[in-house]
Image: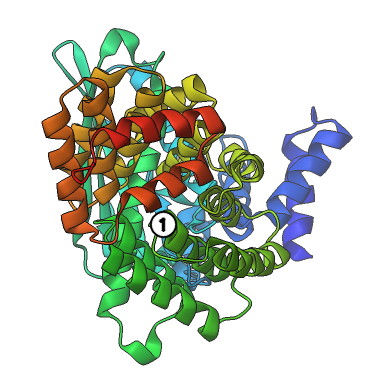
Amino acid sequence: MESINSIFTWLSEHEAGFSALAALVVIIGVTLSPLGVGMRGLLSRRKTNDSAMPGTDTAKPTASSAPHLESSPKQDFLDNPPPLITDKPSIAVLPFVNMSKDEDKEFFADGMTEDIITGLSCDSRLFVIARNSTFAYKGQSPDIRTVGKELGVRYVLEGSIRPVGERLRITVQLIETDTGSHIWADKIDRPISEIFDIQDDVVDSLVTTLCANLSVAEGKRARRQAPDNIKAWELCIDAEMSWMGLRTTGGMVEAQALAKKATEIEPGYALGWAMLAYFSSLNIAYVITDNNDETAKQVDQLINKATVLAPDDPTVLGYIGYTYTLIGKASTGLSYLERSLASNPNSGFFRYAYATTLAATSQLKNALTQSEIFFRQSPKDSNMGAVCFSQSVTLSIMGRYLEAEQAASMGIKHQPTFPWLYVARACALSGLERHEEAQLALVLAREIAPHFSQTKIEKWSRLYFQKDDAAKLNSLLRLAWPES
């Protein structure tokens, strides 16, 4: 109550012009804010400074009162550092440093920082420190390990902007606070004349890439943990790493086992069930199971568990949406993915899943548009090979075979162990009437996935794609099968 009274007193003495409503907003905002302690310190300091203005009688501070007079929001925050209150990967985005002499760039740097915080906050898997807390470090060069302790975070992102000729360079680096080691760094150069027009694109690209690298960092961290200490969240991250990097059958089996273990450790963790549903559905997508109906039934049960636990979580929604697509229910999956991306537009994986699902529902032009958004936002994403596969198949259905072949070839450079890329390339090469190369592509696909056969691939096409689209893909592949 004493702190609230001091706020009332300060407002009445120095802000007579405030309306009653404005004063109420200030009081409630300060009292309920996570930085309420620090803001009350600021008001206390302002009161002291105001009373020390010329023409006022001010007693000299005593030794006991001096520390209070010199307090600041930052100091109050440092004296009482918050504990780490979540098992999620936690991150603080420090204010970007403007290394130019242009004041307009200061606003740009601050805007970049705020937009990145907002973008990261859309990912329900992350715990992101609010802007007010991190901007307390503006104009400073703090030790990152100290920041980690003060804010209770596992990672810190710091960045800067500076002119390089006629271009503006944006540099960022992600640092682990426990060790001070650099996890990831990147730089983006853009023409100074265009920078404000493309700020959203720059932020989207940074956030998407950052989220992907956070997942990699968390996966490596999980693998350093003792087995008895590992948590459901860490198992899920490890599962993602096991699958998405190489997309091999062995990686799929390992990922499914890790997700299953996550649900056993924490049955109330919705993401564990959603990921288990996704990895289980890959048995259909990889034409491993001989009983699609039974597998789809089991996957549906897993989806229901995840949905009951977290019906609005964007990450859970995204996994559920793509899982529906993989069991042949793309129309249902579409709505889940749209809800997921509406809340978390910077997820590279769900952007890819959305593009694939649009292709499966014969919305081909829109599917290509979503693929292009992915390439623009996340050019170094671990899902690059999968997106190239989706784009290649879509282009082949549209009869754009040369572009389809180029997309598949680019994907193979990124993920040479992903067998579906060779299937996609075979389709495109058949369309180009390069039949020997098409046959070789299928030979390579079967070297990676020996169980691939003409019968299984044709069944896969009919499950995922609309009737006419599946017929076109299968007619192209019939020309390429070595045994035909």
Furthest residue to the right?
20
Quadrant that contains the C terminus:
top left
Furthest residue to the front?
484
Quarter of the figure with residue 439:
top left
Decide if residue 466 is on the left or right side of residue 238.
Answer: right
- Look at the picture and state if 202 lies above or below 308: above
Quadrant that contains the N terminus:
bottom right
Local SS, label 1: strand
> Is residue 278 among the parts visible in the rendering?
yes
In the image, what residue occupies the spot 79% across and 57% down? Answer: 5
- Look at the picture and state if 205 lies above or below 417: above
x%, y% of residue 361? 57, 33
Between 395 and 167, the one nearer to me in the picture:
395
Between 382 and 422, the one nearer to me in the picture:
422
Amino acid under disc 1: Ile
In the image, what residue occupies the spot 33% across and 10% down? Answer: 194
Q: How many marks?
A: 1
Between 116 and 135, the one nearer to me in the picture:
116
Q: Residues within 10 Å of mark 1 (few under 14, many from 20)?
A: many
In the image, what residue occupies the spot 25% across and 29% down? Answer: 407
x%, y% of residue 255? 37, 69
Between 302 and 397, the one nearer to me in the picture:
397
- Look at the picture and state if 81 lies above or below 399: below
x%, y% of residue 262? 48, 78
> Is residue 374 among the parts visible in the rendering?
no
- Look at the picture and state if 173 lies above or below 403: below
Report the colour scheme. rainbow
Decide if residue 213 is on the left or right side of residue 416.
Answer: right
Furthest residue to the top?
193
x%, y% of residue 45? 56, 50
Q: Which residue is mark 1?
A: 91
